[in-house]
Amino acid sequence: MRARKSRLRTAVTCTAVAAGSAGLVAGSLYVMRTPDRSAGGQQAALTGEQATKTRRDSAGTLASRLTDRLGARTAGAYIDSAGRPVVTVTNAGDAAMVRSAGAVPKMTQRSPATLNRITTTLRQSFTGVPGTGWAIDPATSKVTVWTDDSVTGTQMANVRQMARRMGAAVRMVHIDGRLRPVALGGASITSQRKRCSLGFNVTRGARSFFLTAGHCGIVGENWRTVQERPRQLGTTVESSFPGDDFALVQTEEAGVGAVDLDNSQAREITEVGEAVVGQGVARSGQTTGLDTGSVTAINATVNYPEGTVSGMIQTTLCVEPGDSGGPLFSGSTAVGLTSGGAGDCLIGGVSFFQPVTEPMEAFDLEVS
């Protein structure tokens, strides 16, 4: 399962949900919304997203298929401002293949092997240093390295020295605030230890489950709804954090495959798909409700104070405590589980999501 994260790839997805007959839809039951994030504005963004859904989904699917085919000969793919899938290549033959498939080929400025060597060096040097992280940017053929407000003094000097040694292949970015998992605060599901958001309802044979963030609970954790009369939901049977950030909770009842849009409506989730850099996405969480944005990186490594998580999807979405485990989706395709980030929904920030395909494949799950 861990070997899958070692190669350049686009991140992947699953379906979103409700839990049981009480109608616990994936994501939030109620919201605390900041003034600049109106329900009307967010719904308008989703309407615009739906209008271009077919083209965007097609571009993402094509980009994913081509990067899988190219393997080590590509530094990744992204969707450009015109909605076209752009796939990086290293030779003219691959460029012709990408073009004939209907995508835009782009010659990499640096080889995928060089970029992978840089991320390997960073992993050896800075894994376990909270507030740092990195990801390959296929559009620039560079590795973006970020640090948050907690990285100062000697640690910051070491990061800068490493970046200088790698020259123009590395771009440093500062993130305001502190990177952390967002499992604290109010949430739509709760256990004895944590309050989080429900992610995706899934099945394996005749058995029903839902997925949430791994840092939300340990194996044996009992989950219930947050209501005037709480209802028992299920028990965590698998959990992975750090390294990954997902948990599998077995339930008594099958859930509904839909995402709460926080406006008395729900978005049906119908398929599993791939997340691609530049793709428009939305996420739902109990604390902050609905937010829309775009994917800025895949296969990202994040060093939380609690440990290192790799293979993550990075986005422009905001997240706050209580949103952990909530669904990330694009149109009717689910993409990930909310893990953590920095900043908040007033000033903005950066956020990271666990690709859903990993637990789906690891546990042989199907969309609910």
Image (cartoon, grey):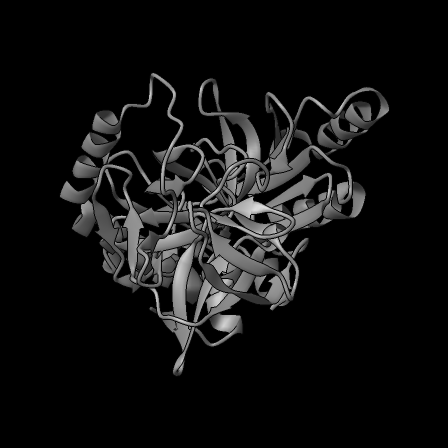
Which residue occupies the extreme right position in the image? 154
Depth check: give the residue in front, 314 or 240. Answer: 240
| Residue occupying image coordinates x 42% and y 33% | 317
Place of residue 172 in the rendered image (x, y in percent of width and height, measured from the top left): 63, 27
Q: Nearer the viewer, residue 102 or 175?
A: 175
The picture places residue 14, in percent across and down from the top left corner, at 38, 61
Residue extending farthest to the front is 229
Whether residue 323 can be seen here: yes
Q: How many marks?
A: 0
Residue 143 sits in which quadrant? top right
Lateral position of residue 298 relative to residue 308, left or right? left
- Quarter of the image for the N terminus: give it: bottom right
Q: Is residue 103 visible?
A: no
Tell me: 71 left or right of 100.
right
Q: Position of residue 307 (x, y in %)?
A: 73, 46
Position of 156 compared to 229: left or right?
right
Q: Where on the picture, by quarter, is residue 305?
A: top right
Q: Residue furthest left?
A: 51
Quarter of the figure with the C terminus:
bottom left
Q: Residue at 47% across / 51% down in the picture?
A: 337
Where's residue 243, x and y in %? 67, 55
66 sits to left or right of 187? left
Looking at the picture, tell me which residue is in the foreground, 140 or 99: 140
Give above or below for 51 relative to 8: above
Give the answer, above or below, for where 283 lies relative to 152.
below
Q: Quadrant of residue 82?
A: top left
Q: Residue visible at 77% across and 24% down?
A: 156
Above/below status of 329 relative to 346: below
